[in-house]
Amino acid sequence: SALERPAEVDWFQYKLKHVDVTSKARRGEFVTPHGVVQTPAFMPVGTQGTVKGLEIGLVHQTGAEMILGNTYHLSLRPGDDIVAELGGLHKFMGWHGPILTDSGGFQIFSLAQMRKVTEKEAIFQSHIDGRKIHLSPERSIEIQENLGSDIAMVLDHVVELPNETKVIREAMNRSIRWAKRCQDAATRKDQAQFAIVQGGLDEGLRVECAQRLTELEFPGYAIGGLSVGEPPPEMYRILDATCPALPTNKPRYLMGVGRPEDLLEGIRRGVDLFDCVMPTRNGRNALAFTDEGTVRVRNAKYQRDSTPLDPKSVPQVAGLSRAYFRHLFMAKEMLGPILLSLHNVAYYQRLMREARQAIEEDRFEAYYEQKMAGWSSGG
Ligand SMILES: CNc1nc2cc(C(=O)NN)ccc2[nH]1
């Protein structure tokens, strides 16, 4: 209702609240029509209108404030027209907080078969039934407006790495032209578009791309085309070059990242927002994140281990033994993937809460050192 929705005038204004004196870590917040997002923040991925394995109330319990939906998947099934007819994605999945939808650019590169990219659009075959799909900047925005997300990502041309500089530059230039076309295609005032910086692992291209997209004055900026197999230090090198080239009064979103250590490495370089399938995908595959590193709960050494997986986890998990988790996965019980996905998403949210607190108290570097030491301790 109007009572709960923040005033329109505040929508999508990023407020930089504090910069940690020991690093480039930022504490901020931004307002969307479905609520405020405290940053740094991690978005659980809800690809097909569900954060896999988690009833939506559990997603809320973890402390997540914004979730991600995939344009490519939802447009194929059930269809963005059907979601629109049923009141939009918030109502469809029962999540009434902020939603960010990606544009499909990454799925073209990572998922679809027989793809062809022209100046007009990307053409590819559905991975569900092989149907030919045309995805243009205009169509991507139309889908995201049908879904009714609060933040829509522009459609960009993601190319695989490593690649020739000429190919990366041409894809980057096309992505900038497509970003403008997305801006021109917008019809909803209650949806903001974030631009996406591309440019491969070339610092010069990344800075040029960031500058040219900044001139188009988007409310937020993503750094895309990373975490696609490059060594982590290469990703950090690109962040070192790209973050300073982006406006300080707009959110910075690192797409598809990452492991807990990648989140802290991103935050200390000035990144505000993350999304990644790792907490849920690894949860389904019996891998738990803890302050002492990852725990493969199927490992035989846990067969008689009465110790809790993580005493600081959510109540549903904190009292259960490692032996019980091993049993659930060995017995292929559904509860295994469900509880470990819940634990991992809650772990990522606790990490973000601790990071926000550390930035406010100007001790982020010390917090970073302490977490890195714990993760490499092999607990
Ligand atoms: C898991 N790695 C990973 N890299 C990504 C890059 C993009 C991107 O550039 N979209 N335009 C999106 C999601 C990603 N996930």
Image (cartoon, rainbow, N blue to C red):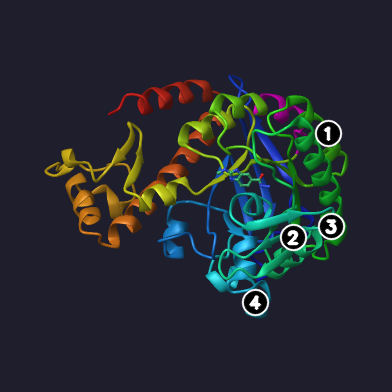
The residue furthest bottom is: 85
Q: Is residue 199 magenta?
A: no
Image spot of residue 223 (x, y percent): 68, 39
Number of numbered callouts drawn? 4
Query: What residue is disc 2 on?
Result: 191
Side of 196 relative to 372 (left or right): right
Could you say which disc has been placed on residue 211 in the image? 1
How far apart, in angstroms, are the residues tagged by discs 3 and 1? 24 Å
Of the two numbered discs 4 and 3 on the same chain, state the one appearing first in sequence.
4
Q: Residues within 10 Å of mark 1 (few under 14, many from 20)?
A: some
Mark 1 and mark 3 in contact (Cβ < 8 Å)? Answer: no
Q: Nearer the viewer, mark 3 or mark 1?
A: 3
Which quadrant: the C terminus? top left
Q: Is residue 221 above or below residue 248?
A: below
Of the two numbered discs 3 and 1 on the same chain, state the one appearing first in sequence.
3
How far apart, in angstroms, are the residues tagged by discs 3 and 2? 24 Å
Q: Nearer the viewer, mark 3 or mark 2?
A: 3
Side of 147 relative to 93 (left or right): right
Residue 2 visible in the snapshot:
no
Query: What residue is disc 4 on?
Result: 87
Q: Is residue 336 above or below residue 167?
A: below
Q: Which residues are magenta?
A: 239-249
Q: Is residue 246 magenta?
A: yes
Q: Inspect the image, locate mark 4, and give the three-letter code of the amino acid beneath it.
A: Gly
Q: Is residue 135 above or below residue 163?
A: below
Residue 12 visible in the snapshot:
yes
Image spot of residue 284 (x, y percent): 37, 53
Of the two numbered discs 4 and 1 on the same chain, state the one appearing first in sequence.
4
Q: Is residue 50 above or below residue 250?
A: below
Query: What residue is disc 3 on?
Result: 120
